[in-house]
Image: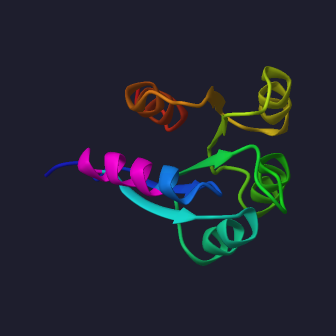
Amino acid sequence: MTKQKPKILLIDDEEEFISTLAERLELRGYTCKTAEDGESGLRMIEEQNFDITVIDLMMPGMSGLETLRQIKIISDELPVILLTGHGSTKDGLEGMSIGASDFLMKPIDINVLLEKINIALGLE
């Protein structure tokens, strides 16, 4: 029997980016859901179980850091990886202090992201 791949929630306001990322992860056997803002991502977390969440730091409305804070209130155990294309290392480090597992700069390397996901889930 094969072990089921993790279920990932991707939260990013760049629709093309997250649909492409979800597709690339699904080709590798992962199950992905996407949300285009922090509010809808939080609703999804309240309604279903995810193994890990990947969040963009810079989003209109609720920022990635605020989304992270709210996720930690809902489910402190849910690992979160932050992505930033415009943010800074300072934002990533702040995210880590709030409880993010890691942060990556965009454009991301899919293999690096997979490695970070596996580390955050204790699979590596």
Left or right of 78, for residue 66: right
Residue 93: image location, x then y, percent: 81, 25
Q: Is residue 70 above or below residue 58?
A: below
Nearest the eye: 9 or 63: 63
- Does the segment drawn in magenta span residue 88? no
Q: How many marks?
A: 0
Q: Residue furthest bottom?
A: 47
Quarter of the C terminus within the rendering:
top left
Residue situated in front as seen by the camera: 79 or 27: 27
Residue 51 in view: no
79 relative to 37 in the view: left or right: left
The colour scheme is: rainbow
**Is residue 28 inside the magenta stretch?**
yes
Point 78% across, 53% down: residue: 72
Judged from this view, the residue extending furthest toward the left is 1
The percent coordinates of residue 98 (x first, y second) are 84, 38
Percent x, y of residue 33: 47, 64
Image check: 2 left or right of 19?
Answer: left
- State the residue at coordinates (84%, 63%): 61
Please name the residue shown 42% across and 59% down the image: 32
Predominant SS along the magenta part? helix
Instruction: Examine the image and state in which quarter residue 97 appears.
Output: top right
Q: Is residue 46 above or below residue 107?
A: below
Give the magenta-colored segment's residue range. 19-29
Q: Is residue 72 visible?
A: yes
Q: Which of 59 and 119 lies nearest the eye of the viewer? A: 59
What's the residue at 55%, 54% (across, down)?
A: 10
